[in-house]
Image (cartoon, rainbow, N blue to C red):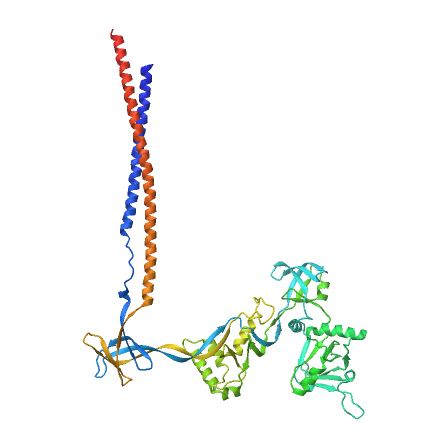
Amino acid sequence: MGLAASQARYLQLSARKTNCEYEGQQINQQRLNLSNQSADLFNQMLAMSVPTPPNTTDFTRLQYSWSDGDMTFVLENYYQLAKPEEEYNYVTTSYHYENVYTGQRKYLNDPQVQATKTNHFSKNLDRNFTVNAISYNADKDTFTLDLTNVAGKTFTTTYTLCSQADSIDTVEQLDAMYGRTAFENDTDTFTITYPLDPEGHEIVDDYDNISITHTWEDPSTDPPTEKTVDFNTYVDTSGDTAEGLENLRKLKLTYGAKYDPDKHYYSGTDEGGNTVYTCLEDVQDAKRSKFGPIETRKEDLNRYYTDGTNFISEETLRDLKVGDTMTTQSATNHPTFGDYSYVGNCPLTMLTEEMYKDDMTIITELNQILKDMGANEGDRKSYERLKACFDENGNYIGGTIYMFTMAGQRYYTTTADMDESLLSAYDKNSVADNSIDSQQTKLSYYDSIYVNTKVSETKKALLETDGAGRFSTAKFEDDSVVYTLNVETIKDEDAYNDAMNQYYYDKDQYDKNVADINAKTEVIQAQDRQLQLKLEQLNTEQSALQTEMEACQKVVSKEVDSGFKTFSS
């Protein structure tokens, strides 16, 4: 048993020793791979070029300059004539700086142009929806509807009572959609009949007995027929009687925010049997000035609801049932502006034809602005707007340009420029509730000033040199004076700063790459140290195995020798 056990142990130790040798070979192979990686990193570092800062001498040059006693000129470029002439041997390009009278356009952020607005609503096509569900909230006075549009899209929307009593814009929008008003510019078709006193004088303040007749030709008939509406009932809105209160209610519903309690209204019946109104003061003013329009208005006792875009009457809403087709109206405003008064807190002054003709400074400034806006580097849009302020003969069209003073400087702007800013206040993306705080488009405004400008000139010259090969004097083809040239060493600061910035960038990149290589090398070295430690452990283990194997061999040898001695005796 001792011999067999020793032999078995020897075999185990032999197998383990073989495995250690194999593991050692694998570790050596890994260390070889790490060595190759380290060599690659070293080669990368050798291939990197170390950035060097730029040399200031690379960015300096000789510069020739001269002075005529008023301005300093710099010789920028020069080349010899292909065929030297008797008086000139070079073509030169020089520059100098001088104050050049220049027209300019600026943009004013948040211009806050103030002006009066005149609405021009146009009715859009009616929109039809199928009603899927409808409910009314009495507390909020709102209608909520589930609708399907003609494209088959289903959605939910809420209709709220519109502010007709608070907003003239809403009144005029409803007028455009529902045809509640008519305008007449020919004052001769309106006749006012005043009561007479015993002496035959008109009593213009006896409002109960004043009547107004509107007569016109209906062009829809052939031949046109004459039609008449008599406004012979004074609408008492004093509110002292039940009839007065009812009249006041009807006028406020019909006129909305356009109702003026200080005016006098008369009612009549048109050819369709509708109650219509007109205002005495409007007719009086129109007849005095020979200018309209005079407004006649159909009585409209409806209240209207809106979802913000579409409008519908309360009567129609309350009659709707599930499955009905709901028809809504809408209108688009194309406002115009006038009576421009302020830009921000700067009062505006309208430039009249007389002011333009009598002020040479204004003529000079505007001509310069037009010239520079129409130049290649100018502003074509501004040029067209300014040009439109003058007729084909160059005569100013009064009222199209306004002036204002800001920080002591006079500026100009056009009605077209102000209209653009004003219209932006009514854009669908406007965030303010008024036309002043929500003007999103910057205002273009103009002035003429002296600007320090670089002026370049190219001309022939006679350049003479000194004994050192540098130019010493210059005489130009348009000047009889021979100028002494000053020679200066000029450093191109911009180019040098660009080169320094590039150097700093390259240096940062180089430092980063070196740091990255060093970091990778440290990782490789750490891995190699771990493999070396493991290899040393295997060597120690292999030595121990070798010692134990030798001991086993001795035991086996003794057992064999003992066995032979036993059988030989």
Q: Is residue 142 above or below residue 470?
A: above
Q: Quadrant of the N terminus?
A: top left
Counting from the top left corner in percent of width and height, residue 448 is at 45, 80
Counting from the top left corner in percent of width and height, residue 176 is at 65, 73
Q: Nearer the viewer, residue 185 or 161?
A: 161
Counting from the top left corner in percent of width and height, residue 95 is at 32, 77
Count of numbered labels shown in the rendering:
0
Q: Is residue 172 above or below residue 482?
A: above
Q: Residue at x 31, y 68 (%)?
A: 492
Q: Residue at x 31, y 65 (%)?
A: 496
Q: Is residue 365 visible?
A: yes
Q: Is residue 556 above or below residue 511?
A: above
Q: Residue at x 78, y 73 (%)?
A: 246
Name the image quarter holding residue 58. Answer: bottom left
* Left or right, 273 with reference to 400: right
* Residue at far top of view: 569
* Left or right, 551 with reference to 380: left
Q: Nearer the viewer, residue 19 or 530?
A: 530
* Left or right, 184 with reference to 410: right
Name the image quarter holding residue 91. Answer: bottom left
* Residue at far bottom of view: 199
Q: Quadrant of the C terminus?
A: top left
Name the image quarter holding residue 426. Answer: bottom right
Counting from the top left corner in percent of width and height, residue 435 is at 59, 71
Q: Is residue 225 visible?
A: no
* Residue at far front of view: 69
